[in-house]
Image (tube, rainbow, N blue to C red):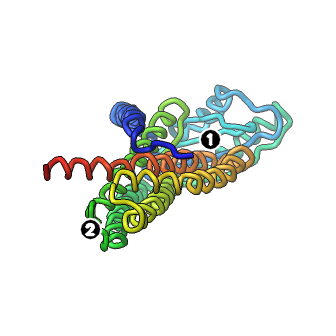
């Protein structure tokens, strides 16, 4: 079966354009919900073994301690997440003791502390700056690597254009992944943190790996089978399509299993990987290679 990837490329561009516009709108209008990794602050997650109390009950108990403003977010499996801008160890212990005493008296259950994290504001700012620097350096090395790997390819498309096409696809992946988490942050409270950055960098690596596989097959077909560049690209995409889909599908099976049966603390990270790998696979097939064809056709028009 030979699928007309190149002939249908305007449809891929339209879909990607719509997703990108929606993502940019969400990012510019709603922004992100940064985690304490980037903002600094404290997070306490506790689980109730019996019936979960109402948020209003917990708020009343916290107010009695007079230890500052809290936000209390219900989670799955009778779990609540407490957040505060600055939360000392003494206040942490007061809160645990107060809620435990109240819960045991009213519900005859136990309170289990799942995690407690506290990061200063200066450390949060440093982590945020390093995250941005890391992403930029990663993108720079990716484009340099692709340009070097395809340095012997000069016709009909120069080697640096392969790197730039891959970079466009990577920016496409980044924007859509950020857009998805901007929307999830607005409506479901999903955060941007260090684990999200890890998922983002993993997405970049996964996407560029798929892209290089297709580009490498294009290079082979140019030398051995075709004088027509668009036909060589389309043949290469058909030859590598099954490999890309099978690899991504098996990876996503594992990720979905972890998402549904793993712990709540890594669900957002796993979801970021699921979205990133899905969109990365899509862009490596439907965006990066068609861009090379359009670049080639533009160059031909200029020559004529």
The residue located at (44%, 58%) in the rendering is: 211
Numbered label attached to residue 154: 2
SS at circle 2: loop
User: Toward the viewer: 61 or 289?
Assistant: 289
Q: Quick check: 135 left or right of 277?
A: left
Mark 1: few/some/many CA within 10 Å (<14, 14-19, 20+)? some
The residue located at (54%, 52%) in the rendering is: 241
How many numbered dots are placed on residues in this image?
2
- Tell me: residue 180, above or below residue 259: above
Marks 1 and 2, how far apart at CA: 56 Å
Q: Position of residue 152 (x, y in %)?
A: 31, 73
Front tag of 1 and 2: 2
On the image, numbered disc 1 is attached to which residue? Answer: 81
The residue located at (61%, 33%) in the rendering is: 64
User: Toward the viewer: 140 or 44?
Assistant: 140
Q: Earlier in the sequence, mark 1 or mark 2?
A: 1
Q: Position of residue 297 (x, y in %)?
A: 25, 48
Q: Position of residue 188 (x, y in %)?
A: 55, 33
């Amino acid at each position: 079966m030979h699928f007309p990837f190149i002939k249908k490329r305007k449809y891929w561009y339209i879909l990607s354009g719509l997703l990108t516009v929606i993502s940019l709108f969400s990012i510019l209008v709603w922004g992100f919900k940064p985690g304490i990794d980037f903002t600094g602050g404290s997070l306490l997650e506790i689980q109730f073994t019996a019936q979960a109390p109402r948020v209003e009950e917990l708020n009343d108990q916290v107010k009695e301690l007079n230890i500052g403003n809290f936000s209390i977010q219900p989670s799955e499996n009778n779990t609540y997440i407490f957040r505060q801008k600055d939360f000392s160890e003494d206040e942490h212990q007061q809160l645990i003791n107060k809620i435990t005493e109240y819960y045991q008296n009213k519900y005859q259950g136990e309170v289990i502390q799942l995690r407690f994290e506290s990061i200063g504001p200066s450390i949060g700012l440093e982590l945020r700056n390093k995250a941005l620097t890391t992403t930029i350096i990663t993108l720079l090395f990716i484009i340099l690597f692709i340009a070097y790997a395809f340095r012997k390819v000069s016709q009909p498309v120069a080697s640096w254009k392969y790197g730039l096409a891959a970079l466009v696809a990577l920016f496409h992946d980044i924007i859509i992944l950020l857009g998805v988490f901007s929307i999830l942050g607005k409506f479901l409270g999903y955060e941007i943190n260090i684990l999200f950055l890890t998922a983002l960098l993993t997405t970049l690596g996964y996407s560029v790996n798929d892209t290089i596989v297709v580009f490498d097959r294009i290079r082979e077909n140019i030398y051995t089978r075709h004088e027509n560049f668009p036909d060589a690209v389309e043949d290469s995409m058909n030859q590598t399509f099954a490999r890309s889909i099978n690899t991504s599908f098996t990876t996503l099976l594992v990720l979905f299993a972890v998402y549904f049966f793993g712990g709540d603390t890594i669900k957002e990270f796993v979801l970021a990987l699921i979205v990133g790998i899905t969109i990365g696979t899509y862009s490596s097939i439907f965006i990066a290679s068609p861009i090379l064809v359009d670049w080639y056709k533009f160059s031909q028009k200029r020559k004529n």
